[in-house]
Image (cartoon, grey):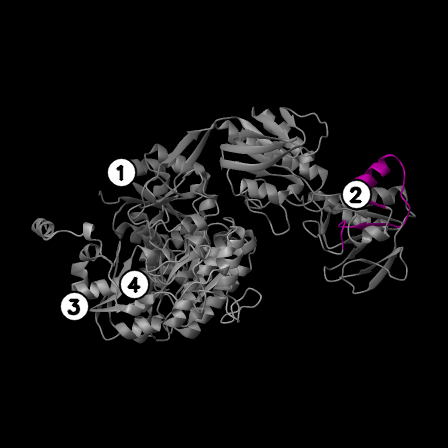
Amino acid sequence: MAGRKPKVVGFCCERHGMDAAVLSARSGKEFDASVRLVQVPCTGRVDGMHILKALEDGADCVFVLGCLEKNCYYDTGSIEGRKRVEYVKQMLSEVGVEKERVEMFNSASTNAWMFPEIVSKMVALAKKLGPIGGEKQ
Amino acid sequence: MKAASIQVILCKCCTELPAVLNIERLRKLAEESCNVVSVMMVDAICDGKGLPAVVNNAKEAEVDRAVILACHKKDIDPALFKAYRRAGINEFMIEIVNIREEALLPHASEPERAQLKAETMLAASLARARLLAPLEKQTEAMKTKNVVIIGAGASGQAAAHAAAKTGAHTILIEKTGKSLKAPGIVMPHSQVVGAKGYGGNYQLTIKAGDKIENLDAAAVVIATGGGWTQLKGPLAKAVKDAMPLYKLHEHLQAGSVPKGPVVFVDTPDPTGKTMKVQDYAWDDTLETALQLKRKARETQVFVIFQEMRAFGLSELAYKEAADLGIKFVRYDKSAVPKIDPKEPTNLIVKDFAQGDVLSIKIGTLVFSSIPANQDNQAIADALRIPMSVDGGVRRGSIQRWPVTTPRPGIFVCGSALFPKSNEVAKAEGEAAGSMAGEFVAKGEIEFGGSVAQVTQEKCSACLTCIRTCPYEAPFIGTASKAEIKEQLCQGCGMCVGICPSKAIELHHYTDDQIMAQARELLGGDF
Amino acid sequence: MIVAKRKPLNEIAEMVAPYKRVSVIGCRSCVAICLAGGEKEVKMLVSALKVKNKKEGRDQEFEALVVERQCEKEWVKEVEDKVLGSDITLSMACSLGAQTIGDMYPSHVTFPGLNTGIFGVPEEQGVWSEKCVGCGNCIIHTTGGICPISRCAKSMLNGPCGGSANRKCEVNLDTDCAWSAIYDRLKIQNRLELIEKVTPAKDWSTSHAGGRRTYVREDAKLTPHQKKGKEAIQ
């Protein structure tokens, strides 16, 4: 099935994460359309369940994008977010699913070039790993 | 429960949207979607012209929620929410979908994929919109009109004047005993040592002299300025004729020119042991160096710096400085300026740009920046606000909220953020003072809305939320279960994501809402 | 409280693999508080297993449930239908919960999802340490309030042993020597004379060594008459 497009979900915090995505679009940067953004107030809101559920529902890769850890709007939010992602990674490796499918990123809202890089990295990974359980999905 | 009835608004973004996307297909999809009772197209939702028609349509169609396909939510005019409110639709029942920056702009070269993505986003937002619930904000009266300003320097005084103009009672808290004229009350020899409460109703603990006093404050402005003004570290031992920038400025005003060559360094401790918020020279360095060079053309002038920040048009000064022959040397933290061991009157600097090692004779050493105020940490701890890595107070957002902190009712200005010139500090002080004044003038605090709430039957009282929350909003209530103090809750949802019993839910970002949106987004194939 | 830890997911997946319908039951008491088997962990576990099944193309149904205290029959009763409606139950409570379900429904297979470890206290968020082994005969009034049975690797009663060096335990150099701690505590309390007192060999008959223990409080027990009344109501 050559035509299958990768599916990547990005949980972006309402502060720096989503602003970085918006800024990169406004600065004329293009990124792969496969990425689906879900806004959360803070990456600390992201529950491991949300990430696992997205994988269950058909995502090839999931990323969480928050503020820089030392400049998080909610102080410790993006640190919490990272810990949630790490726990999910651990669970995935326990069940034998590539833990690279889930990743945490941090970006400043003023950083326009970072978001397209994150997207291309995750989309390339999604293409390389393919869907969980193979093409039959 | 009554089934949702949704109004869908398609914003054409003038001509941008139809240029890439097939808006008719979007309209058709919206019309065919479950629960959608009205679909409307507008030229541009942001200009406000179409707003009355949109709201009338919502009234006629008797919808209880709306999905608006437009651009970034933060750039939507609050007037939209007000207009909907008049039509009886709660602001939390309006879902704004950023079709412009998430599908239209970044995928313009692949219109078909962009179209499919936009359609999927519409479906996902409808799924989310069906799960939305109206939320009412609550209010609480402010007990005082006090604006407490910490620090009576340039920015603090400017803040006091600005806040007083709005009718607030200003109280300046100054650590030293310096006399000054400012509106309202000035408390010399005082420091803030503790704080309770939340934006609008803070109770500060002030150490005034030897006494501990309590002070109610509706808003707080942090104007602590910079730290010490003496040379520190090995340089202090070697160099005797060193002065801070403002001293040199005073000398120049009085007509005296210091002994050349004059060397400007960015910090009073270049060896880096105490480096915090001082690693750059600001625009006043340029101005003063220029004044000096204009007065004494033969005096050699060096500016040694790691980072240089010139504010606005003061950047023009670079050109004149270059023309007049002021030498700029940029160094890196890995090779800080040192006294020449062979020639104790010389400073060795490695030029970061050229790689040359220069030995500069010091006539007069001027340090142009000041470190972060040592008191910042204590004040930040007392007010529970985050600090930046370099020892300054952190602001809410550099673009949107340059003089606010993430905590409502606490503002910050001047060198408390990072070192800056007098003028900029004053301008920021005015901004912070007027914002604090405006905040107090409202007379009441609005809270609630998108905040966390505990389902007590599920709560195990495990204290995890209390340990995790950076705002101390959760507490164990009389029922021995966790509760959330809504006035303190900032709606980040950290407690919600970590609660092991899933007993906490964040309004407007519930698990169901987040997961429904993600599931629907994954449904589309593009 | 009882502190437990989730078994590795591959182990759990292997246990439940032969069964089609799996009910996963968490508990809102100790294991929720020690972040091992509350509602969140149950839901994440189910989700992770589903992702695994998706990868391996296995078809299994999961039901995520949670009860207030799985070690008590009355609470388990609330989810009886769901338990019996499944082919197998994975208990995400401590072993007590798993055994309660097992005892209630002997023909129904119940597996443990957690490894039940210790009677411990949270030292900080995410760190739990053992402070009691349930020996059934508490002596901490003589040891400055510090339990040498659980906190000393050798359960010394007249410690420390010769392996104590620099206040650390020879069995694990990251662990403080319990007897150093006891000495310090007694010193603060001005009760150092206790350390010189020789404690005779402990009576271990109250501990697990004597076999399964049952604690009974006669006055709290319901009389046959009362029990009958209860049954009549139910």
The residue mark sitting in front, 4 or 1, is 4
- Hey, which residue is sitting farthest right in the picture? B298
Q: Chain of mark 3?
A: C
Measure the alpha-carbon separation of dots 2 and 4. 66 Å
Measure the alpha-carbon separation of dots 4 and 1. 48 Å
Measure the alpha-carbon separation of dots 1 and 3. 57 Å
Magenta segment: B242-270
Residue C98 lies, with reference to residue B416, above or below; the image says below
The residue mark sitting in front, 1 or 3, is 3
Earlier-in-chain disc, 4 versus 3: 4
The residue mark sitting in front, 4 or 3, is 3
Q: Residues within 10 Å of mark 2 (few under 14, many from 20)?
A: many
Q: Do circles 1 and 3 both sit on a common chain?
A: no
Q: Chain of mark 1?
A: B
Give the residue at mark 1: B62
Q: Do circles 2 and 4 both sit on a common chain?
A: no
Left or right, residue B503 beside residue A13: left
Q: Do circles 1 and 2 both sit on a common chain?
A: yes
